[in-house]
């Protein structure tokens, strides 16, 4: 059970000095302001490592001060998961969705990874690609359960803070647009990355960049995953650039409300061409980077009652 401050893992506090050295050293943090109202924007990774936690005391303080936590999509909620699953559903079998050569390559990967391809039938290729990515990253020792945004979401629910979605199922709609040749190309990129051992290097480099707050490196690694081909670049724009105006509009609306917001969005959206920070500035929102060094809290908060635990680790 991963938490911003691991309340239920008392022994972990004895390792505070070790964690302080291992965790994220320079969190990606911004203050957004417009018409006298402010909000905090925290750049996340959707995957993570246990030693990302506890998070920086400066980030924790801003999280604690917030009335509302806003995330791209709250995958702990049934409604969001159901909506995404509906977008991913198909009556076609995998053998019909993939050309023969790609299907043969996927079958070899599945056999080596212990993955039952029959369980992927009934899902569109964009969801199959997502499942394959999760499977591969898990085998590489990287877990979505340790991802910053998911951990923050669960912490917010545990503390009974209001949690809202910046995109919700619309996030899945951006992925769902990759059906057909674009999804097949994505499958090819995935299989090639595994064969050439690129995925392990990419995720290792991305986590290293996140630890030191190198957002430009994160954006470059993310962009490189799509390649230089027109179809790959179309996918990159749909996954990143095309979403930013809508996200900025929603955030602009938050700055018109009385509540204090803590926003958690993937760090890859903050850098590179047509990034989210630029989209926010186009709406008259001032974006100010906040540079802080990570530091573990000086003392742990009290233990919660045994019967009042956090939500289950599995998000469904």
Image: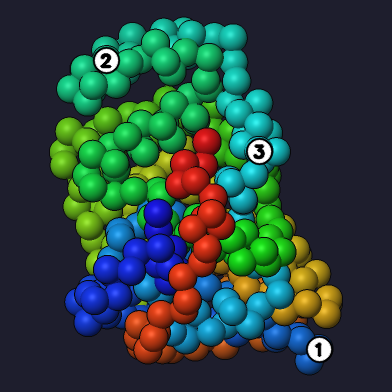
Dot 2, crowdedness within 10 Å: few (<14), some or many (≥20)?
some
Point out the tag, 1 or 2, that comes first from the N-terminus: 1
Q: Secondary structure at mark 1?
A: loop
Residue 11 in percent (x, y) is at: 27, 68
In percent of width and height, residue 127 lies at 49, 30
Which residue is the site of mark 3? 78
Left or right placement of residue 238 versus residue 133 in this view: right
- Of badges 2 and 3, nearer the viewer stands 3
User: Which residue is situated farthest in the bottom direction here?
Assistant: 36
Q: Which residue is mark 1?
A: 35
- The answer to whether one can see residue 264 in this image is yes
- Residue 81 found in image quarter: top right
Q: Name the residue at 41% across, 50% down.
A: 145
Q: Nearer the viewer, residue 287 or 153?
A: 153
> Which residue position holds label 2?
107
200, above or below 296, in the image: above
Asked if marks 2 and 3 touch (Cβ < 8 Å), the reply is no
- Is residue 274 toward the left or the right of residue 231 in the image? right
């Amino acid at each position: 059970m991963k938490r911003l401050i691991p309340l239920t893992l008392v022994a972990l506090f004895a390792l505070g000095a070790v964690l302080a050295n291992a965790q994220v050293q320079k969190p990606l943090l911004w203050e957004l302001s417009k018409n006298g109202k402010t909000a905090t924007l925290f750049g996340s990774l959707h995957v993570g490592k246990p030693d990302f936690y506890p998070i920086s005391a400066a980030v924790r303080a801003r999280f604690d001060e917030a009335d509302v936590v806003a995330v791209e999509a709250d995958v702990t909620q049934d409604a969001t998961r159901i909506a995404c699953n509906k977008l991913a559903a198909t009556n076609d079998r995998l053998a019909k969705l993939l050309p023969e050569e790609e299907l043969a390559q996927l079958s070899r990967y599945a056999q080596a990874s212990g993955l039952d391809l029959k369980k992927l039938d009934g899902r569109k290729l964009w969801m199959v690609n997502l499942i394959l990515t999760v499977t591969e990253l898990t085998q590489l020792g990287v877990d979505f359960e340790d991802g910053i945004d998911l951990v923050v979401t669960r912490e917010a629910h545990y503390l009974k803070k209001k949690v809202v979605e910046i995109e919700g199922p619309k996030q899945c709609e951006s992925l769902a647009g990759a059906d057909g040749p674009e999804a097949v190309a994505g499958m090819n990129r995935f299989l090639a990355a595994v064969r050439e051992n690129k995925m392990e290097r990419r995720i290792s480099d991305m986590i290293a960049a996140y630890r030191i707050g190198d957002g430009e490196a994160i954006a470059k690694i993310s962009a490189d995953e799509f390649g230089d081909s027109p179809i790959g670049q179309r996918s990159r724009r749909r996954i990143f650039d095309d979403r930013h105006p809508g996200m900025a509009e929603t955030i602009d609306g938050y700055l018109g409300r009385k509540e204090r917001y803590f926003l958690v969005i993937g760090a890859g959206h903050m850098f590179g061409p047509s990034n989210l920070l630029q989209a926010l500035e186009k709406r008259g929102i001032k974006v100010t980077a906040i540079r802080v060094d990570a530091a573990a809290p000086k003392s742990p908060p009290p233990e919660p009652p045994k019967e009042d635990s956090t939500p289950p680790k599995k998000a469904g």
